[in-house]
Image (tube, coloured by chain):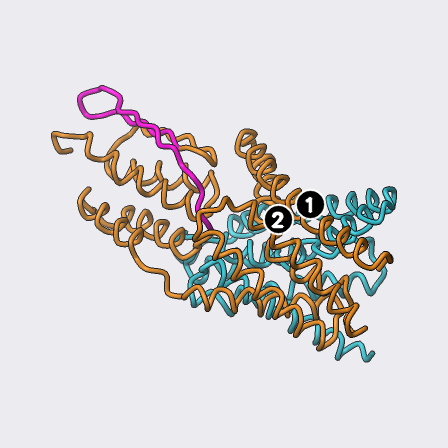
Amino acid sequence: MPHNDTIYMAPLHLAGRLIMENGGETYRVEETITRMGHAFGFNEVECFAVPSGIFISYRKADGAIETAVKRISRKGIDLTRVDAVNAVSRRMEQEQLSCEEVLALLREIETRPPKITRLGLTAAVAMSSAGWAAMFGGGLMDCVLAFIVAFFCQALAFALDKAGMRSFVSTLMGSFLATILPMLFHLATGLLMVEQTVAACLMPMLPGLAMTNAVQDTLRGDMVSGISSATSALLTASMIAGGALMGTALFRLLTGGVL
Amino acid sequence: MNIVLESLIKLVSSFVGTLGFAIFMHAPKRAWLPASTIGGAAYLLYWALLQLNLYEPAAIFLGALLGSVLGQYCARRMRMIASIFVLLAMIPLVPGLGLYRCMSFLAQEMYSAGADAGVRAMVDVVMIALGLAVGSFIFRMAIRTKPAKEEPGK
């Protein structure tokens, strides 16, 4: 074991932050950091992670305990990065990697530019909404309109994100548009199954990941993470509900009718 | 509609929907097709069980269970993290239509219908999570009883 054990905190922190920021689960952060700490040769490694922060401590060769706390703000979901960090920690079990090598590998993962452009991501969301429209029992017309509306909503979400808006603002506006646009189209043309199309456009915004994570964390015994994920899911769901209610209410005000 | 054609539409549409999510969530490229196929298979099982008049939460549970087991098997074979496959597999089962119906009823001041739809959607979400949890439990039991041919990985 080298003399200065303090340097090992940097790769441990970076690995944990990368997993958490990119949508990984808290248990995965704890497992990965503990595994990496053991691979570095520390016997006593403890990690406690919640969705908003990571606490790491390990016992150095001289017997003192090194501890650090890192505040995390979640960014988005990037499963490729989570998988890559996991692969690095697995590789450390197989072969001896120095602290600098691990740090370089993790920095490369952090700075690696995303392979798909924003336009590509927007098109992917639109394609997915078209799929959900058909899955919910809609016809060809519903799929086409779901594609267009979801494309528009996602483009708006990216634009608002770029302008520095909080994500729940774009969820609120997105769900408002996803509700009112199909309704107006239905009013104008008489085509379309409104319910299926709106639900298909709302699917990409739904906090499916946070909802299932919340139940799974709770089942695993991680109550703090469970409640944190549940609160985040509830907030997103409330924003979608608010947007959809505003859309429906405005439509009723404009037309005076029930859809 | 012809039942074969209809199930084909369900399979393809949930496949396409999951594929879009896989791209959006930046899943590794080689996971796109297997993850979407598992998503389609999980939804198809759920839909087929509903056609057989099974109780809806039970159908959701079994669909999520299938997605979880297939996802973890695939993750092990492809040496990737299981979350990629398991998360994507359960996305078609998320009750988007049910949640929208709930909001739509509430907006029309039909509160009891809204509460009914909302509670149903919540039950579905809990069933998805239970299906995933039981699926990973079954998978772990299965690989423990069988002697490992390859070194354990994820």
Helix or strand or loop: what does disc 1 sit on? helix
| Badge 1 amino acid | Gly
- Quadrant in which residue A256 is drawn: bottom right
Residue that appears at 76% across and 78% down: B4
Which hue is chain A drawn in? orange
Chain B as rendered: colour: cyan
The mark found on residue A128 in the picture is: none
Question: In the image, B112: left or right of B146?
Answer: right
Q: Quadrant of the C terminus of chain A?
A: bottom right
Q: Position of residue A2 (x, y in %)?
A: 13, 33
- Dot 1 or dot 2: first in sequence order is 2
Within the magenta stretch, is there residue A59?
A: yes
Relative to A97, B20 lies left or right: right
Residue A242 has which mark? 1
Amino acid of disc 2: Leu
Q: Secondary structure at mark 2?
A: helix
